[in-house]
Image (cartoon, coloured by chain):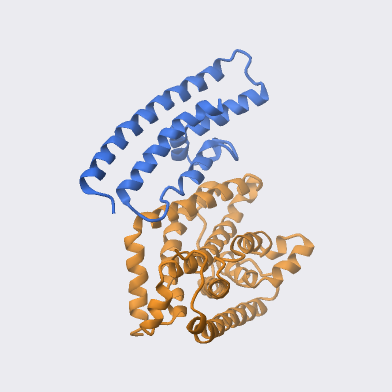
């Protein structure tokens, strides 16, 4: 489950890394990704306590589903496995979607960087 | 004044040039504080949420000022100021290192101004109340001003130690964390457990925080108000004096003779 949850995160990381090539700043501009993912993933407390807008954003964050699955497994609160498989399907879909987006974006950024140079 | 203008311009220009890092930093601080606020408020009884709002909001705002000041001055001095070789460069142009580093207040103020509205929205949402920002604005401003002077002075003192020892930002993490937990910043001193109150009273920021809370929500300070006002003013002035004296010694008796030796130098 954790490994499956890491696959979409790889895509998100590549997207963030592509942005670094565009903004070209010396410090790491992706520092805020970690606390953001922690905030909206329900790691520390349920996503339900967040403002409604952040709850909507949380649906697009893969870590939320890993946390959901961990809760389901640790509490053995599902007997049919339907809920667990829903989470697995969502993570699999996100893995494909984010990595596809990353693949397309990094190609464009790479072409732009080659044309413009990176100073 | 003619020497301060280029320093202010330098920091404004640098903030603009590194705008993405600056915005990233704003979100970084906001998210970390949001994680803390939402977590802490989960344990506050529902009927007390509305009254807790101002303390929580101004507590995190004050901590943001303290934390940002220390990191943006003490951290920056070694990791950027020394690494880029700017100490000698400024001294050759007859510009004091102290003034350049104190000029970071421009960046700090901009950062705090960007984070604070997010914090207000978040605390308002979490407590379900649109609380007034101040009931006695002068006391609030006095508390914030003295805390800012203390924080900037503390950042400069750490910076002076860093420039002398070559160790970047000694004590940065430990002191920031301790001050927030037991320093009377997060919660009023009177609400801390018995022994911790004595510790909080010994930490300078607690006096400024008590004055600030009195101005923000009318909460009576742990010590009499006049004592808190006097202590926070005196401590702020004393810390500023210590920072000034340390830098005077450092610039005239150390750097001119030995140069700077930062670990971060590349």
Nearest the eye: B106 or B200: B106
Image location of residue A73, percent across then percent down: 63, 23
Picture quadrant where residue B166 is located: bottom right
Asked if residue B79 is positioned above or below residue A80 in the image, the reply reads below
Regarding residue B173, the answer to whether it shows in the image is yes
Asked if residue B32 is positioned above or below residue A13 in the image, the reply reads below
> Where's the C terminus of chain B, which quadrant?
bottom left
Regarding residue B129, the answer to whether it shows in the image is no
Nearest the eye: B256 or B59: B256
Nearest the eye: B92 or B13: B92
Nearest the eye: A38 or A59: A38
Asked if residue B240 is positioned above or below residue A93 in the image, the reply reads below
Image location of residue A3, percent across then percent down: 53, 27
Residue under the image location 55 percent in, 19 percent down: A83
Residue under the image location 76 percent in, 60 percent down: B193
* Horizontal side of residue B250 vs B26, given as left or right: right
Residue under the image location 41 percent in, 64 percent down: B110
Q: Report the chain shown in blue.
A: A
- What colour denotes chain B? orange
Image location of residue B170, percent across then percent down: 60, 66
Total of numbered circles in the picture?
0
> Where's the N terminus of chain B, which quadrant?
bottom left
Residue found farthest to the top: A80
Picture quadrant where residue A11 is located: top left
Asked if residue B17 is positioned above or below residue B11 in the image, the reply reads above
Residue found farthest to the left: A115
Image location of residue B200, percent across then percent down: 70, 67
Residue found farthest to the right: B195
Residue under the image location 60 percent in, 28 percent down: A70
């Amino acid at each position: 489950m954790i490994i499956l949850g890491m696959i979409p995160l790889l895509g998100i990381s590549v997207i963030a890394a592509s942005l670094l090539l565009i903004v070209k700043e010396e410090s790491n501009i992706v520092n805020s990704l970690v606390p953001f993912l922690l905030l909206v993933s329900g790691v520390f407390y349920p996503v339900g306590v967040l403002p409604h807008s952040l709850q909507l954003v949380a649906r697009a964050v893969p870590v939320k589903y890993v946390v959901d699955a961990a809760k389901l497994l640790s509490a053995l609160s599902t007997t049919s496995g339907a809920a667990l498989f829903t989470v697995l399907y969502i993570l699999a879909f996100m893995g494909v979607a984010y990595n596809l987006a990353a693949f397309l974006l990094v190609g464009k950024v790479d072409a732009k960087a080659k044309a413009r140079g990176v100073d | 004044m003619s020497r301060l203008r280029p320093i202010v311009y330098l920091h404004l220009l640098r903030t603009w040039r590194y705008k993405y890092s600056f915005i990233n930093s704003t979100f970084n601080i906001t998210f970390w504080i949001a994680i803390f606020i939402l977590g802490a408020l989960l344990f506050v009884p529902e009927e007390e949420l509305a009254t807790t709002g101002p303390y929580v909001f101004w507590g995190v705002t004050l901590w943001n000022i303290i934390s940002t000041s220390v990191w943006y001055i003490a951290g920056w001095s070694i990791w950027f100021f020394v690494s880029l070789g700017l100490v000698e460069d400024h001294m050759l142009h007859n510009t004091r290192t102290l003034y350049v580093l104190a000029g970071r207040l421009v960046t700090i103020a901009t950062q705090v101004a960007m984070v604070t509205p997010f914090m207000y929205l978040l605390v308002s949402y979490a407590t379900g109340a649109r609380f007034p920002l101040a009931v006695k604005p002068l006391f609030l401003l006095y508390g914030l001003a003295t805390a800012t002077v203390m924080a900037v002075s503390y950042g400069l003192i750490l910076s002076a130690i860093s420039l002398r020892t070559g160790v970047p930002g000694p004590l940065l993490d430990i002191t920031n964390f301790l001050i927030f937990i037991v320093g009377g910043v997060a919660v009023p001193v009177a609400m801390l457990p018995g022994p911790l109150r004595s510790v909080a009273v010994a930490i300078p920021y607690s006096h400024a925080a008590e004055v600030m809370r009195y101005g923000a929500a009318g909460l009576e300070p742990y010590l009499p108000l006049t004592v808190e006002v006097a202590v926070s003013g005196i401590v702020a002035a004393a810390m500023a004096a210590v920072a000034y004296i340390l830098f005077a010694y450092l610039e005239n008796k150390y750097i001119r003779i030995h140069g700077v030796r930062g670990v971060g130098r590349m």
